[in-house]
Image (spheres, rainbow, N blue to C red):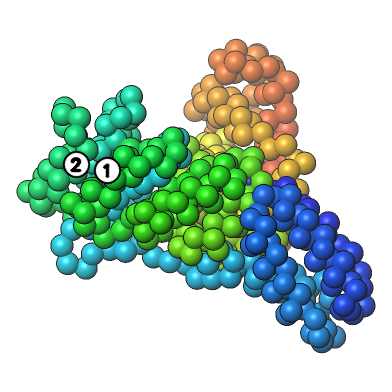
Amino acid sequence: MFEDLSLKLDVALKKIRGQGRLTENNISDTLREIRRVLLDADVNYKVAKEFIENVSAKALGKEVIASVSPGQLITKIIYDELTLLLGGNQTELNINPSGATVILIVGLQGSGKTTFSAKLAKKLKEKKRKILLVAADIYRPAAIEQLKMLGNQISVPVFSLEEKDALKTASLALSHAKENHLDTIIIDTAGRLHVDEDMMNEVAKIKEITKPTEILFVVDSMTGQDAVNSAKAFNDIVNYDGIILTKLDGDSRGGAALSIRSVVGKPIKFISNGEKLSDLDTFYPDRLASRILGKGDIISLVEKAQENIDEIEAGKLEEKLRKNKFDFDDFLNQIKAIKKMGSLSSILAMVPGISSQIKSANVDEKALIKVEAIINSMTPEERSTPKILNGSRRKRIARGSGTSVQDINRLIKQFNEMQKMIGQMSRKGSLINNLKFN
């Protein structure tokens, strides 16, 4: 989402990077351009104005020490202010220390509440919580069936009633959870096309009945300032505890994410940036600020790798790399590990120096699928001994994978070049230091 904003901020900061010192004039010129960039990104007008005033106040009169350039200093100030704008510190989910934890999910229709409910259930289940999903959206066609399907994918029970009564569903769900020793109840409520008085009263009654430990407002970040307006209206009525930003992998300008915390005064707790049930991340203001400024997010990248890459398998791979015996089976396993970490573009966005290039790089997410199809069409012998891939074998693999011989040739060429590079790194003794799993 933030690639366009990052590129424009980078352009705005280029002018001051070449300056020998900070002056009132070059600070003013730079911040005027940054203000325009923020407004173009659909950041709330008052939020953008206050942000620029804060950066200006901190930048004016700052002495630039010999080891720091004006560009570095102004970037650091902007990074600090962005972090504060996004909430300052990461805010944990409220968990009841004694008794059941009830989490009420609210939001507009189409914001992704049902999918988020399942994503949150998966995340909490991995932390050994015993989850019950509650289908209290009785209005949207197939909403209950959707939640049941998602619950089945992650082996989490879903409570629902044939009777179309959201209040009764929520109330009986609490009794069901207690009887079955389930300690976390996630209630998916009905969405609204707009802030409807009757529907809001229903949510208020569900809140009164269930006495939730946590109320989370799910908002579609693609809706721009409408997201901020609906967040404020919901908070006035429900007084929720945290915000969930969904569809951060979309093409919107990012203004909602930058404005919502400041306008509503409630922390962003999770961000959803993909369609997979694993595509849910804890929100860290400092990490997102770093990504917006094109500095990547190495901490999140390492955490994702540690969550998705098996340490034992990593050790086996290290041994094979040391002996330069990396084959197509290993290649396939690494592709699967990468896919578990999320979309290719979201992974690259975390790498410093690469995030600013993604917009123009046209990352092809389908390329990995094609490579998988090719490798899966090889025999075990062909995968372990790529040297035997002659012309006739390549034609057979192309037919089996639905690709062309040219695609096969290209992959084999890239694979051979990668093997040469691995061999060179091994001989230099740098491979193990770079790839060792910590």
Furthest-front residue in this view:
197
From the top left corner, tell me how far across and down residue 403 is, in percent.
Answer: 64, 18
- Say which of 149 and 191 sits in front: 191
* Residue 243 against residue 286 in the figure, above or below: above
Placement of 104 over or under 433, stated as above or below: above
Which is nearer the eye, 398 or 47? 47
Question: In the image, is 149 to the left or to the right of 38?
Answer: left
Q: CA distance from mark 2 to mark 1?
A: 8 Å
Res. 161 image quadrant: top left
**Which residue is rendered at x = 69% and y = 50% of the image?**
41
For mark 2, what is the residue? 167
Within 10 Å of the Cα at label 1, are there few (<14), some (14-19), or many (20+) other Cα atoms? some
Callout 2, which amino acid?
Answer: Leu
* Marking on residue 202: 1
From the top left corner, tell me how far across and down residue 245 is, in percent.
49, 50
Q: Is residue 438 visible?
A: no
Residue 67 x, y percent position in the rendering: 82, 83
Q: Nearer the viewer, residue 269 or 350?
A: 269
Q: Check disc 2 and report its element: helix, strand or loop.
A: helix
Q: Earlier in the sequence, mark 2 or mark 1?
A: 2
Q: Amino acid at mark 1?
A: Glu
Taking the image as shown, residue 438 lies to the left or right of residue 368, namely left
- Asked whether disc 2 touches disc 1, contact meaning CB atoms under 8 Å apart, the reply is yes
Q: Residue at x 32, y 40 (%)?
A: 199
Query: Is 367 above or below relative to 40?
Result: above
Which label sits in the foreground, 2 or 1? 1
Could one spot residue 271 in this view of the protein? yes
